[in-house]
Structure formats: C-alpha cells, structure tokens
Image (spheres, rainbow, N blue to C red):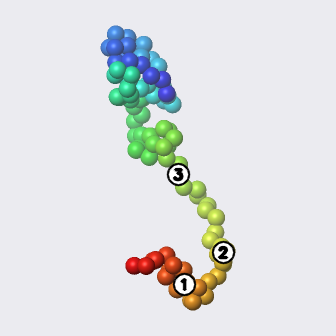
C-alpha cells in the first residue's frame, strides 16, 4: 500500500490516481498520520470481496475437517470436577 501526503494528492492528483490499481490502494496522510484510503472502484464488488482483497477476510474452506469421534484430553470424575470448581471459586 503506497502512501502520499494530502498536499501531494492536491498538487499531483492525476499522478497519484495513476498509482491506484485493482490490487494496490493509496493511503493519503495528513501531518504524517493516515487519514484516507483511495482504492479502485469495481462494479459489483461486494463488501466481502473487498475485505478479502485487502487481506482482512479469509473465506471458509469448502470441505472442513470432520469432527473427531471422541475428543481427546483427560476424563474427570464428578468428584474431581466438583473439587476443581471449589478450588476455582476460592473462599467466596
């Protein structure tokens, strides 16, 4: 993502807009702080498609892994669970 100052955008608008591509946005800064983003407009571009292009969204896999038949980990008895809960609650 390229950065330009607000002044540069004001004085060289055409050159700055030429830097904007389908995959690369331009961030406009004011006093060194990012304030605006200039991006290419795509007809029919949904919000999810835009987020995916920006790398802020990953679509779910089409064939997720199956749930395990029996989850792993330790098995606790009712007495052990009660003792752990009493310990977690403390002296309340």
- Residue 92 visible in the snapshot: yes
Dot placed on the residue nearer the N-terminal end, 1 or 3: 3
Q: Nearer the viewer, residue 13 or 27?
A: 27
Q: Which residue position is annotated with label 3? A: 59
Number of numbered discs on residues: 3
Q: Which residue position is annotated with label 2? A: 73
Contact between labelled residues 3 and 2, with CB atoms less than 8 Å apart: no
Q: Nearer the viewer, residue 87 or 9?
A: 87
- Give the Cα separation between the discs numbered 2 and 3: 30 Å
Residue at the farthest top position? 11
Q: Which residue position is annotated with label 1? A: 83
**2 or 3: mark nearer the eye:** 2
For mark 3, does the 10 Å Cα neighbourhood hold few (<14), some (14 to 19), or many (20 or more) residues?
A: few
Above or below, comparing residue 37 to residue 80 in the picture: above
Q: Position of residue 64 (x, y in %)?
A: 61, 62
Dot placed on the residue nearer the N-terminal end, 2 or 3: 3
- Give the Cα separation between the discs numbered 2 and 1: 18 Å
Instruction: Assign a secondary structure to mark 2.
Output: loop
Q: Nearer the viewer, residue 73 or 91?
A: 91
Rendered residue at 54%/84% (across/down): 83
Contact between labelled residues 3 and 1, with CB atoms less than 8 Å apart: no
Instruction: Assign a secondary structure to mark 3.
Output: loop
């Amino acid at each position: 993502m390229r950065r330009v100052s607000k002044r540069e955008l004001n004085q060289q608008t055409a050159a700055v807009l030429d830097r904007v591509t389908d995959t690369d946005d331009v961030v406009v800064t004011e006093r060194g702080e990012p304030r605006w983003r200039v991006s290419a407009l795509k007809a029919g571009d949904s919000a999810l498609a835009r987020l995916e292009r920006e790398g802020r969204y990953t679509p779910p896999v089409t064939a997720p892994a199956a749930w395990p038949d029996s989850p792993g980990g330790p098995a606790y008895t009712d007495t052990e669970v009660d003792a752990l809960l009493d310990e977690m609650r403390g002296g309340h």
